[in-house]
Image (cartoon, rainbow, N blue to C red):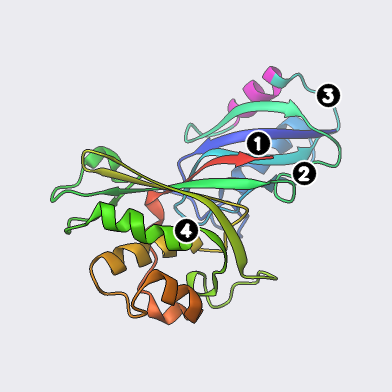
Amino acid sequence: MKYRITLAYDGADYFGWQRQLNQPTIQGVIEVALEKLEGAPVTTHAAGRTDAGVHAEGQVISFNLSREWESGELRRALNGNLPLEIRALDAARAAEDFHARFDAKSKTYRYQIWLAEVMNPFLIRYAWHYPYSLNVERLAEESKALSGAHDFTAFTVADCEAKTFIRTITEIGVEREGALLKLFFTGDGFLRYQVRTMVGALLESNRGRLKAGSISELIESRDRTLIGAPAPARGLTLIKVEY
């Protein structure tokens, strides 16, 4: 029987979603908990394979179990076998052909930046401390160049194994609450490190340090070496998946 669950997790102490040998991962912990319920190994599939240190508020996973579970019972049983930094928010039966990754229509990520000389200690795990001058209005304007369908080769890793580097970003939001800047990216999918690299490029451009000259020129170049390091993982959260 196919099930789907929405997960929230603090990924700061994990090596990402995907199972790795001798490393703590979200998938590894989830599958150990599900094996206790199933009495046999369970393979899970996630909507987004979040990287090391990345968080989630609305990750969706799918998997099969041999017995029928009532939704609330499954959620409670799973949470009872998970560490407190990983929570199942809901659980439900799904169509037998449902796949959390391949059926996803869009994903929304949020990136948080703390714009003050002194970092807020309560956000140290969830935001990038950026104690430099930043023109938020200019950043919002420049971010528009990322919208639409583009070849995002310049915004991923050199060994990315994606079949195509074309992705469509349907919406970009910029919100500021005091010293906390929130950037939202919604698209049909994202390459590895894409969101963090886009954030890094926007901030480099804001400081006049983008070698390509502009975000549009960077996209056209398809050259990853024209950008500095991606923004730190701790500021990134997968907040929603639409089906």
The magenta segment: 72-81
| Residue 121 location (% of width, % of height) | 22, 41
Using the image, tell me which numbered label, if any, was put on residue 33: 1
* SS type, badge 4: helix
| Residue 92 location (% of width, % of height) | 73, 26
In magenta segment, residue 75? yes
Determine crowd level at label 1: few under 14, some 14-19, many 20+ residues with C-alpha closer than 10 A: many
Q: Would you say the residues marked 1 and 4 are in contact, meaning their CB atoms lie under 8 Å apart?
A: no
Identify the residue position indicated by label 4 in the image: 195
- First in sequence: mark 1 vs mark 4: 1
Question: Quick one: 218 or 110, which is closer to the camera?
Answer: 218
The mark closer to the camera, 2 or 4, is: 4
The mark closer to the camera, 1 or 3, is: 3
* SS type, badge 2: loop
Q: Would you say the residues marked 2 and 3 are in contact, meaning their CB atoms lie under 8 Å apart?
A: no
The mark closer to the camera, 3 or 4, is: 4
In this view, 1 is above or below 172: above
Determine crowd level at label 2: few under 14, some 14-19, many 20+ residues with C-alpha closer than 10 A: some
Three-letter code, disc 4: Val
Identify the residue position indicated by label 2 in the image: 41
| Residue sitting at x 42%, y 76% | 217
The CA span between labels 1 and 2 is 10 Å
The CA span between labels 1 and 3 is 17 Å
- First in sequence: mark 2 vs mark 4: 2
Residue 25 lies left or right of residue 10; in this view the side is right
Three-letter code, disc 2: Pro
Quadrant in the rendering for residue 189: bottom right
- First in sequence: mark 2 vs mark 3: 2
- First in sequence: mark 1 vs mark 3: 1
Identify the residue position indicated by label 3 in the image: 68
